[in-house]
Image (cartoon, grey):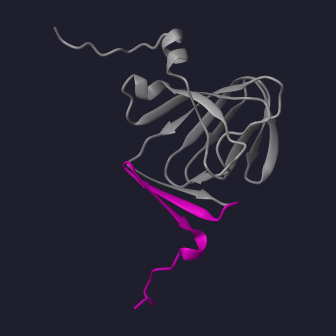
Amino acid sequence: MTDKKSFLLRRQQIEDSMQTFSHPWNPKSEISGAYLGRALGLKRTGVNLAKIPPDKESFVYHSHHCEEEWIYILSGHGVAEIDGKDFEVEPGDFMGFPAPSVAHHLRNTGNEDLVYLMGGENLEVEIADFPNLEKRMLRHGDTVEIYDFSDAKTFGASDP
């Protein structure tokens, strides 16, 4: 008997796979989510379902250098901080962040869960900036390194 690959996730499977996590740099971060694309074997495209409870936030204000990202609001109300400006978001709103992207972040300002689909590319290498924290992330495969902006050195013809 061969192991058959699934191409369909049922609602109950998605609900059963939901996990709650937060970003360690943001004490208001709390998200419950499910990796939809990964569960079906998608490697180049990420598609995730996410829920942010009232008065909580997604991750931390960030931008991407390599990977494009998108968000589609399914239910609830929130505020998207995009490139230093706040925008109220509601069901049916779509956000897209072509790489290199402007910084962005999502907060739930409503009285119910803010539910959305998010996704983007899954590249082997990604660089993300966290401008409010003055930090940069470099991810190569499963290895993640964090640098302070102040540690950056320009490399060029004038270097020894």
Looking at this view, name the residue that lies furthest to the left.
1
**Foreground of the two, 134 or 73:** 134
Quadrant housing the C terminus:
bottom left
> Does the magenta run of residues contain 79?
no
Q: Left or right? Give the position of 116 relative to 139.
A: right
Q: Is residue 79 above or below residue 102?
A: above
Q: How many marks?
A: 0
Q: Which residue does the image show at 75% across and 38% down from the upper left?
A: 107
**Which x, y percent locates residue 32?**
61, 28
Q: Which residue does the image show at 60% across and 75% down from the upper left?
A: 150
Which quarter of the picture shows residue 29?
top right
> Does the magenta run of residues contain 133?
yes
**Which x, y percent locates residue 16?**
51, 16
**Foreground of the two, 94 or 131:** 131
Quadrant housing the N terminus:
top left
**Which x, y percent locates residue 154?**
50, 79
Looking at this view, name the residue that lies furthest to the top.
1
The region drawn magenta spans 132-160
Q: Left or right? Give the position of 136 relative to 103.
A: left
Q: Which residue does the image show at 69% across and 45% down from the upper left?
A: 105
Q: Which residue does the image show at 48% across and 13% down from the upper left?
A: 13
